[in-house]
Image: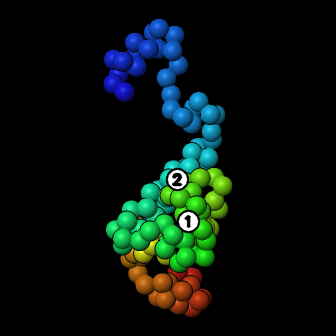
Amino acid sequence: MDTRKRKALEAAGWKVGDAGDFLGLTEEEQQIIEFRLMVGRGVRRLRERRHLTQQRSAERIGSSQSRVAKIEAASSEVSLDLMLRGFFAAGGWLADLVPSPRVPSRPLRARSRRIGAGDGTP
């Protein structure tokens, strides 16, 4: 929504916000919802890219076609565990969902040796 429209609505007494504001969701709850939506959309995108039906996807994860439909809709009736199993079974990778952490500037082995050497260096 553009700033002009928002200000006009607020001046008319309307409260402007998003679904999280309307539902009174905490930041954590909003992030969980966004994550569920991301996984659900990813399952559908990957399934369609691989030309799999919901039935075939269901067979791969040991579930039902209706469960796959609920996964793709990010339904709260479906556990995150099942959603992630559906995502990985459709060919998704963890890196598709979570950006990789930065590679340490030094190998971890070198760090652990130095710490265990007892020479007082960080």
Q: Position of residue 2 (x, y in %)?
A: 33, 24
Q: Position of residue 74 (x, y in %)?
A: 55, 54
For the residue carrying disc 2, how many other residues have a C-alpha within 10 Å: few (<14), some (14-19), or many (20+)? some
Judging by the rendered image, the residue that carries numbered circle 1 is 65
Residues at marks 2 and 1 touching, judged by CB atoms closer than 8 Å: no
Q: Position of residue 22 (x, y in %)?
A: 59, 30
- Of the residues under marks 2 and 1, which one precedes in the sequence? 1
Q: Is residue 114 visible?
A: no
Q: Residue at x 36, y 72 (%)?
A: 50
**Colour pattern:** rainbow
- Where residue 36 sits, quadrant-wise, is bottom right
Residue type, mark 1 in image: Gln
Relative horizontal placement of residue 14, taking residue 67 as reference (left or right)? left
* Residue type at the position of mark 2: Ala
**Residue behind mark 2:** 73
Density class for disc 1 (Cα within 10 Å; few <14, some 14-19, many ≥20) is: some
In the image, 86 versus 63, the foreground residue is 63
Q: Residue at x 62, y 34 (%)?
A: 23
> Secondary structure under badge 2?
loop
